[in-house]
Image (cartoon, rainbow, N blue to C red):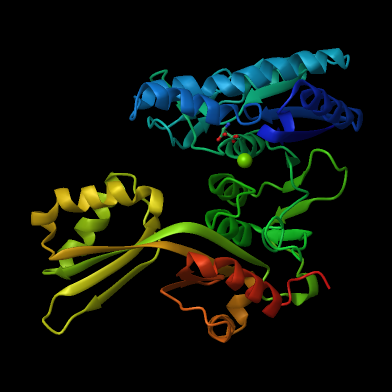
Amino acid sequence: MGLIVQKFGGTSVGSVEKIRNVAVCVKEETERGNNVVVVVSAMGKSTDTLVNLAKEISAQPNKREMDMLLTTGEQVTIALLSMAINQQGLEAVSFTGWQAGITTEPIHGNARISNINTTAIERQLTAGKVVIVAGFQGVTEDGEITTLGRGGSDTTAVALAAALDADKCDIYTDVTGVFTTDPRYVKSARKLLSVSYDEMLELANLGAGVLHPRAVEFAKNYQVRVEVRSSIEKIEGTVIEEEAAMEQNLVVRGVAFEDEITKVTVLGLANSLTSLATIFTTLAQNQINVDIIIQSTTEGGTANLSFSIQTLELLETLKVLEDNKTELGYDQIDAENKLAKVSIVGSGMISNPGVAAKMFAVLAENQIQIKMVSTSEIKVSAVVEEKNMLKAVEALHEAFELANN
Ligand code: ASP
Ligand code: MG
């Protein structure tokens, strides 16, 4: 008998009708002779609704209470799904994060899972029950309820699959798999049959949106076989595994993109040696995610520093820099808004020089100016003006032969 962890996202449990569908899907898995642990998100957009309620009360709600509020969303789904599974003639039991033994670090809003004690889940599985676990939540050692960051139910599912040594983790969602680029924007986008953990990690971090980045980290670290698939269409999805089959020997496997990027430039840093460390430590302490970083020295011996952030975090970034102006010792700050990041990803890049050159040539041919660049072994990202984002994506998707024939 195998053990399968199934995860259903918000759209897949968005109504009573859809919850019934999920119950059928769970039943089918048990009929294949498997034990099933189900992880669910809050129904539809209900997490957003809860966030908005909080905002009506306070511009900066208390983070502990925010977690208390948001975790109720998943709690609704687990109970309803348990009832729906009962209707299918199966025994089920629902668990909140703490009941499922999920301990996290003591951070509200974006906690990492630190440990999972699977005793309670295993006891119920042994008793022949389907176990339903609320995604996106855990508890600290001190008994405080925490959340794992938006989209964190994926992480709950993969972490449980790792802890339970499950045979597979199926992520059921409203798309049929991982695509070469976002099919909502690029009609010729194609579904990939498999991607490697590293490729998926890059894609997830680049905002491909199908999987929470930390879920991919877990999958990679514990070698969990993950499949992203549709909860409606019963077709093969995309398998995420160590070595993805090199479909058509593609060097580039996907084009990811993200808008609302801002480039912040700190001009005239007096002592670039220490201020660089101070700036990024200070930003990190304030939970501001910095992406691409470029430093250049000027003739006068001072340094200019540019980095990209999400536009959403601009106000806070400026405040942090202003508050620490004396300590950091700079002249001035500039911010350029309305930028976007376009990235190409593929493990094949490691052994194929010239991929970045080709990317820049394609962008140049299309008169798209590049503002910043960053690379990793399997990724090249370029920051461009937001208005050029989709043009760049389409041109790259075409040039690297990712399109449907
Ligand atoms: N309900 C949470 C959210 O909307 C967690 C999740 O869906 O993964 O972010
Ligand atoms: Mg999600």
Between 298 and 118, the one nearer to me in the picture? 298
Q: Is residue 345 visible?
A: no
Q: Residue at x 71, y 21 (%)?
A: 131
Between 169 and 282, the one nearer to me in the picture? 282
Between 182 and 126, the one nearer to me in the picture? 182
Counting every numbered tag in the picture gives 0
Residue 235 at x, y = what percent?
87, 47
Residue that extends furthest to the right in the rendered view of this protein: 31
Residue that extends furthest to the front in the rendered view of this protein: 387
Q: Is residue 242 left or right of residue 150?
A: right
- Rendered image quadrant of residue 169: top right
Classify the position of ligand 2 by quadrant: top left, top right, bottom left or bottom right.
Answer: top right
Quarter in which the C terminus is drawn? bottom right
Q: Residue at x 73, y 77 (%)?
A: 401
- Rendered image quadrant of residue 22: top right
Residue 378 at x, y = what percent?
57, 70
Residue 163 at x, y = what percent?
62, 35
Q: Residue at x 82, y 13 (%)?
A: 86
Residue 347 at x, y = what percent?
63, 70
Residue that extends furthest to the left in the rendered view of this protein: 326
